[in-house]
Every structure is written in C-alpha cells, then in structure tokens.
Image (spheres, rainbow, N blue to C red):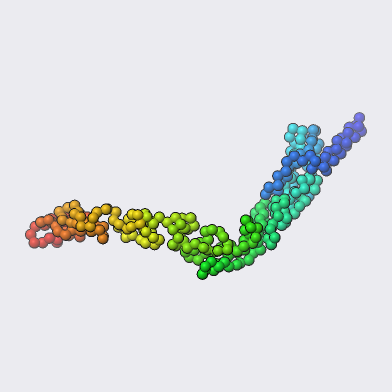
Amino acid sequence: MKKIAVYIFSIITGILLINIKGASGLFTTYVDGWGQMSHYSLPSVTGIGCMVANHKYPNSTSRVELKNTVCHVYLTCSDNWLDCDKKLDNGCETKASEKNCGKCGVTCPAGTFCKKTGTVAYKCECPPATCRVQSGNNSQEGVMTLNAATGKCECLVTKCPNCYADCDKNPKNGCEVNICVDPNNYMGCGKKLDTKKDPNNCGQAGRKCASYQVCNNGVCGCKVQMAHGSKCDLPNANAIWDAGTCKCKIYKCIAGWADCDENPANGCEKKYTGAKKCN
C-alpha cells in the first residue's frame, strides 16, 4: 500500500509539473502595467500544485496562493525585465529596451532611447543635447525633447527672456508671446487683462491710476463721482470739489473758525476769538 501511495503521489506531482510547464495554456489573468506583474492560475485540488509552483522563476520573484482549489501564482519581474510571452516557466524573459520600454510592445521612436525614470517607470527620451530656437528677433535656449504628437526629437524652450513666454508649446516658434503687453496672456499664459477695472492697467497695459483714483470703464477717475466745482459739505467751511485731486478744497472758513491742521476732511476745525486764528 505504501508503494502504491508513493506511486500515485508521483503521478499527481508529475501531472502538476506538466501543467506548470504549460502554464500558458492555463493562463487566467496577465497584467503588464508599470509594476511588470503577471498572474497565472492552475488547478490544485489538494494544494500540491501550489507547493510545486512555489519556486524561483528566471528574472523574477513569485508568490503562490491557494483559493478554492485553484493555485494562483503572482510573478513580479526583476529590475529591467518584463514578462511578455505570458509563459510562467521562463519567468520574465524580456529585457526592457527601446522595443519594450517599460511595457511589452511599447516601442521608442527612432533616435530615442528607453530610460528608467522611477522604481518601475520607464520613458522614451531624446539624447541629452542643448539647442536654440529663433522667435522673431529673440533666440531662446532649449533642450531636445520628444514631441509625443510627432514622435520626433524637437527643440523645446527651457527658459524665456523677460516679458516673453512659450504659451502655445510649439518648439518651432519658441517664446512667442510678450506677456508684458498681450491682454490675453498678461504676465502669464492664459491670464486675461482687465483694462476696464484694473487700476494698474486702466485702458491699456501699464497705465496706472493715482492712489486716490479708481478705474471705471478704462478711465481713471475719482471714487466719488462729483462735478468739478460742486459744493462740498464740510464743517464750518465753504468748500468745492476738485476733480483733479478727488478732494474737497476749502476756499473760505465761516467767521470765528479756522483751518489750522490743513486737513480738508474736518473742515475749519479751530474756533478762535480775536486776531489769532491758529496758535
């Protein structure tokens, strides 16, 4: 009986080994994301399949888990390796390259190379090189960068001179916008200039209103809307509105009162008797 049991165990183990060798036929789920992970499954009624499957596969680490008579094998590829043929027995057989840059089948355009940019991240990049872009009378420095739309290495501006910006991200025209005067890109791409209400750009870019003025429909004016020469109501004084300074001006104090602090806001604030007005 003992010999029969050993014999049966050998047969079952042999069948499971055959299943593992042909695991691609029993393949359930394959994930080829940035983590370079694969998921295989094979029958394991007694759990022996998981015992057999739990061993080292080339260029990878593995983990097995038995769930409802099915053995799941989770394969994680080693650095710079991928599992592209969906076969468990040879592990992660494909090395990351310009033909498989971080993902199986991701090919880098001609003239670029596959660069590792993180723990499990890869990116097609242009060979490092500086370049210059001519835009009008300005020449800006840039670096060769892969244009995802064209698949070609193009000169991308990295630094614009003062008052200029690269708003359209077109490497061919460099820093094409003068953000110091452009009302649709004022002091930054996409920032619209409000010349109707902005006291620092009233009517046009750079036109500043005085500190006591506001911008109304592109014209600098007083916060208080009064006609020049209109009568002002100030304490103990006769005063008129000066539209040039946006203030009331005292032209005469009533008898017995004087404007000693020269502050038009409080009118003629000093009461006096005799000849002396302000001590």
Q: Residue furthest left?
A: 274
If the image is split into quadrants, where does the N terminus sit? top right
Is 88 left, or right, of 277 in this rendering? right
The x, y position of residue 20, in whole percent, is 81, 41
Q: Nearer the viewer, residue 117 or 1?
A: 117
Instruction: Report which quarter residue 238 is drawn in.
Output: bottom left
- Residue in the picture at 70% in, 52% down: 106
The x, y position of residue 258, in whole percent, is 14, 58
Is 212 left, or right, of 34 in this rendering? left
The x, y position of residue 67, in whole percent, is 73, 34
The x, y position of residue 99, in whole percent, is 73, 55
- Residue in the picture at 47% in, 63% down: 178
- Residue in the picture at 8% in, 61% down: 275
Total numbered circles: 0
Q: Nearer the viewer, residue 186 or 35?
A: 186
Q: Residue furthest top?
A: 1
Q: Is residue 205 visible?
A: yes
If the image is split into quadrants, where does the C terminus sit? bottom left
Q: Nearer the viewer, residue 46 or 225?
A: 225
- Residue in the picture at 52% in, 68% down: 136
Q: Is residue 50 visible?
A: no
Instruction: Report which quarter residue 227 is drawn in.
Output: bottom left
